[in-house]
Image (spheres, rainbow, N blue to C red):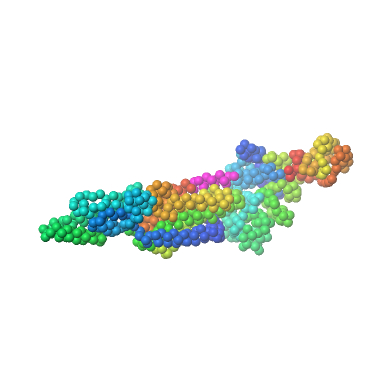
Amino acid sequence: MRILYLAMKDLSQIIRQKKSALFLLILPVLFTGLLGAVFTRNGQEDPRLPVALAMRDAGALGAYYETLLGYSDTIHPTAPGQTDAASLEQLVRSQKAAAAVIIPEGFSRQTLAGESPRLTVIVDRNAPAGQAADRAIQLAATRLLGAVQTARLGAEAHGPFGSEAARQEYLLASLADAVRAWRDPLVRVTARPAGTGNAAADGFAQASPGMMVFFATIGMITPGYLLLAERRSRTLARMLTTDIRRAEIIAGHTLAMFVAGFLQVILLTLFGQAAFGLDYWRDPAALLLMAGVLALWSAAFGLLIGTLARDENQVVLLVMGATLVFGFVGGAFFPLDLAGAAYAAVGRMMPSAWAIRGFQDIILRAAGWKTVTGPAAILVLYALAFYALAVLRFQSDAAR
Amino acid sequence: MTSTNAIQVKGLKKNYNGFPAVHNLEFTVREGEIFSLLGPNGAGKSTTISMLSCLLPPSGGDALIAGHSITRASGSVKRTIGVVPQEIALYDDLSAHQNLVFWGRMYGLRGSRLSRRVDEVLDLTGLADRRHDRAGLYSGGMQRRLNIGIALLHEPRIVIFDEPTVGIDPQSRRRILDGVKEINARGVTVLYTTHYMEEAQELSHRIAIMDHGRLIAQGTHNELMRMVGGLHRITLTLSRKPAGLLALWRMLAGVHSVSEEGERVRLLVQDSTRVLPTLFESAAREETHITGMDIQEPDLEAVFLHLTGKALRD
């Protein structure tokens, strides 16, 4: 019962602090709106990966290949300023293009003559974007060859032509039809976000969980400060002169931080659902599980900060320092996949990355509670580690 | 006051990194009395209180509080005592009422008993009219009173005060001392620590004097006074302090001790009337002027000076 009374006292103190509302609700809402708008505006230009296309072929097949590249859901061809190989390589290296394709001179003539001209593709196959672009480029090439083959077979089935010019004319017309057919194929596999399916919401699908996780730890400034004040004002020592046990004191403080964090997540997901159409509440069990583990981790973090800090400045410094690392490295501000494989690998060591992953599984991939148990379990492990450190620190501090 | 022991301290020790902060303490506090631990800063009073409050584990020895061992039954000890810490240990952002309700709950009070005790303590501390004001807005004296009131919520048999008057104005100090007497008049045993001789003298039925972690004397005020017999304490302010003069004074008949404190020299003497002319005469021979003089009847300061050779405030 005393755990509950202690938690109620802490919550009452948290509510009284003006900065609680700022860190727990106002700033996350503002930042979600801001970042979501930025991501969405960028997304509206063309969400597909840019592929620089250097066209050196004057024939029809080069143009058809460009058309087929344009039909892709993954990439869209762009015309680079410089078309020499070195400039194109620089474009790919600087990530201004996911890949570059050089269509050589005589490509159409050689292909129609049954030869196998080589397309030059410049791509970083270690980058996820490069891999996706490469697959799309190969697919367009395969479709072009398929179209050529279809046109040839059509010409053979037609029987003898009056002249070679008539055959060429028929062949090119068939080719145009075959290429056009890929614009709206009979069978089409489309990867769509399973959650909202709403392009405008995509930016918020990154910003909302990102900011929710980012401010889950920043929100611990007030509870951390209250715990520090309790140690410094000797109210903690006074509490230890009553017959409450140390474990009860730790549990009471943790419960208050957990409740504050949990309510923060619930309110922010309701806001995300209402304002941005993010379907957090498709499976309430999954959402409650993720909200619970995120609140547990942030509570353990708050407890650790409250036991480590020696003054108010240190509370802010430790919370902000750790949160910035969790946020920037863990992908709160941008998708980890956009940052390269090495960065993403380091990012996935952050508990924040797993929290964001869990929430994005819910809103983008319609994950149920079983699917998010993986990220949830990892967050619980981090929470236990933080909690153990906090308890050790608390015990040694209270003994002084 | 009865002859039953409320607190029995048996060979209590506390070492910090091998350094003895409290050394082999032995004393008893009888039920219903006010017992003061008197000593200068760093004497080990607060460490002793922390051990008796079960905040610090002793390095050796034990103490029985209302028959419960501090090392083996800390829960029972904590339910028996109320502790008034030296610092103001309150939640500034909560009102007096909210502080008392919270601490009452921590002491295990519930329901109507909690409400009754909160109201009684608000009346006792004179804070009933401002019960809903934030504690952080109170004056230092009001905060001190609330600090004390919290320790009384669960109606403890024994209340431990750890230097409750440090750094407060004389008016608030007066109220606190009167409050301690009132608490004691209700049958509560009081263990009071202070480095103010006057407080120990005014409040206590019995006094123990501590220095460097050791108990150097204990007894009633009269018993302690008998240790210095009829010794008077003379404080002289000199124009200069020639070493030869102080050495000479130490050898004079009737002079028990001589100690220096800044510009002043303190002497414990058997009979100030007989010794003073000799002091003036010898000072004149050393071309030293006595520019100030204060003669006091035997008191606890004299006892401390007699036992340690230094002033209590050193």
Q: From the viewer's perspective, is A398 left or right of B239?
A: left
Q: Position of residue B307 (x, y in %)?
A: 75, 39
Q: Give the vertical position of B255 relative to A235 (above or below).
A: above
Residue found at x 54% / y 48%: A308
Q: From the viewer's perspective, is A92 left or right of A261?
A: left
Q: From the viewer's perspective, is A185 left or right of B52?
A: left
Q: Nearer the viewer, residue A341 or B41?
A: A341
Q: Position of residue B11 (x, y in %)?
A: 65, 38
The outermost residue toward the bottom is: A274
**Residue B159 located within the stretch drawn in magenta:** no
Q: From the viewer's perspective, is B264 left or right of A43?
A: right
Residue found at x 30% / y 50%: A121
Q: Nearer the viewer, residue B273 or A281?
A: A281
Q: Position of residue B92 (x, y in %)?
A: 61, 57
Residue found at x 44% / y 55%: A333
Residue B174 visible from this viewpoint: no
Q: Nearer the viewer, residue A352 or B207?
A: A352
Q: Nearer the viewer, residue B152 or A143?
A: A143
Q: Position of residue A175 (x, y in %)?
A: 20, 58
Residue B110 visible from this viewpoint: yes
Residue found at x 17% / y 56%: A152
**Residue A397 located within the stretch drawn in magenta:** yes
How many numbered marks are there?
0
Q: Quadrant location of the C terminus of chain B?
A: top right
Start and end of the magenta stretch? A387-400
Quadrant assignment, res A358? bottom left
Q: Give the vertical position of A37 relative to A392 (above or below).
A: below
Magenta stretch, main secondary structure class: helix
